[in-house]
Amino acid sequence: MKVSGFNEAVAHAHEKDPQFRPEGYQFIRESLEAILKKRSKGKQLSPSAHVTASELLDGFRRLALKEFGPMTITVLDYWGIHSSGDIGKMVFHLVEAGAFGRTENDAPGDFEQGFDFQESFVLPFLPPAPSSLGETPLPRVQLPVP
């Protein structure tokens, strides 16, 4: 099904698969635009060149961390996005709606082995574990018994 604009494509995709919120589709588009903008600045490839699944996932991860920091996992969870595979499903919903293009070699499975959400969006924000080398444990405080 071909649609006339991106918002219509998002509405079609959301209707087909309501697991993913429209904001998530918009963020995928922003990620793609950021990749193409970076390419044009770096004179790597023409801005219209094909973006691979791994490039889109990397751009998505970087933009999410930049935009949402320690709240990234919470935002993505709200949007229904829990894995790289979910991003692939969303991309292919947009392909089906005519908002994104693809090559004959592109497949939703290309996104499956992208990155681990816990490792990328949670672990960087956890406090460091106490070192066993020379760390003095906190003193135990005994409270008075009433």
Image: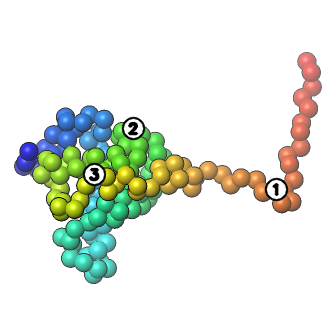
Work out which quarter of the rendered image holds the N terminus and state it. Answer: top left
What's the CA distance linking mark 1 and mark 2?
A: 38 Å
Q: According to the image, label 1 marks what residue?
A: 132
What's the CA distance linking mark 3 and mark 2?
A: 22 Å
Q: According to the image, label 3 marks what residue?
A: 108
Pick whichever of labels 3 and 1 is earlier in the sequence.
3
Around disc 3, counting alpha carbons within 10 Å, would you say few (fewer than 14), some (14 to 19), or many (20 or more)? Answer: some
Around disc 2, counting alpha carbons within 10 Å, would you say few (fewer than 14), some (14 to 19), or many (20 or more)? Answer: some
Left or right: 133 in relation to 71: right
Q: Which residue is drawn at 29% across and 74% down?
A: 39
Pick whichever of labels 3 and 2 is earlier in the sequence.
2
Please tell me whether mark 1 sits on a helix, a strand or a loop: loop
The correct choice, above or below, for 57 with respect to 37 in the image is above
Please tell me whether mark 2 sits on a helix, a strand or a loop: helix
Q: Do the residues labelled 3 and 1 touch (CB within 8 Å)?
A: no
- Residue 73 location (% of width, % of height): 46, 45
Q: Which residue is drawn at 28% across and 51% down?
A: 108
Q: Nearer the viewer, residue 142 or 9?
A: 9
Which of discs 3 and 2 lies nearer the camera? The answer is: 3
Q: Are marks 1 and 2 in contact (CB under 8 Å)?
A: no
What amino acid is labelled 2 in the image?
A: Tyr
- Residue 84 location (% of width, % of height): 38, 51
Q: According to the image, label 2 marks what residue?
A: 78
Tell me, yes or no, if residue 34 can be seen here: no
What amino acid is labelled 1 in the image?
A: Ser
Q: Which residue is drawn at 35% across and 48% down?
A: 85
Left or right: 135 in relation to 46: right
Left or right: 8 in relation to 28: left
Q: Nearer the viewer, residue 84 or 9?
A: 84
- Residue 70 location (% of width, % of height): 51, 50
Residue 48 appears in which quarter of the rendering?
Answer: bottom left
What amino acid is labelled 3 in the image?
A: Pro
